Image: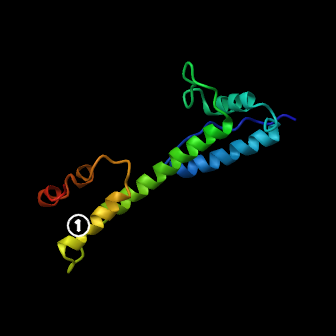
Amino acid sequence: MNIQTIRQFESGRNTAEAWKFWKQNFVNFLETAGYATQSEKTKTAVFRHVCGDEIIKPKAGEAELKLEQILDGFDKFFGDYKNEILASFVFLEIKQKPHEKFQEFYTRLKLGAAQIACLKGLGNLVVGKGKGLSQRFP
């Protein structure tokens, strides 16, 4: 049986969704091409072949990773990426309501910022939102 190799991963606009669909195609490819029952070394080599060597290169002296570990790592990376983008978008859309006290607004901002674990600080997101507002953040 001769099966065509799948296309290399392309992130596009929605990286998390692109990864999810590419991973499913890759797992299907492993199964239909007969690689699913092969050794971990073979499956990892197939992954590197269809993904490209630049995506994952083993470092000198590092143990060879199993395919499942590699895929789990990418799942976590792209899952975190999706959550960070969504949390950033939601945070940037927070506006003070007409009759809302500043303290309540500030509390909502702090809760929104708490969801963005990867960012270094609120100052990065508040830049350009008004000098008075950015000065109130610790």
Relative side of 76 to 47, left or right: left
Q: Residue furthest left?
A: 132
- Determine if residue 39 is in view: yes
Residue sitting nearer the eye, 92 or 12: 92
Q: Nearer the viewer, residue 115 or 93?
A: 115
Residue 12, percent from left and from top? 51, 45
Q: Which of the 4 image quadrants contains residue 137?
A: bottom left
Is any atom of residue 14 visible in this view? Answer: no
Left or right side of 56 for 85: left
Q: Quadrant of the N terminus?
A: top right
Residue 16: x and y in percent read 53, 50
Q: Quadrant of the C terminus?
A: bottom left
Q: Quadrant of residue 100?
A: bottom left
Q: Nearer the viewer, residue 44 or 17?
A: 44
The residue lying furthest to the bottom in this view is: 99
x, y percent for residue 30: 76, 39
Residue found at the far right of this picture? 1
Where does label 1 land, which residue?
Answer: 106
Q: Is residue 114 above or below residue 78?
A: below
Q: How is the image coloured?
A: rainbow
Could you say whether the residue bearing mark 1 is in a helix, strand or loop? helix
State the residue at coordinates (68%, 31%). Answer: 44
Q: Position of residue 67 (x, y in %)?
A: 67, 36
Given the image, on which type of amino acid does mark 1 rest?
Tyr
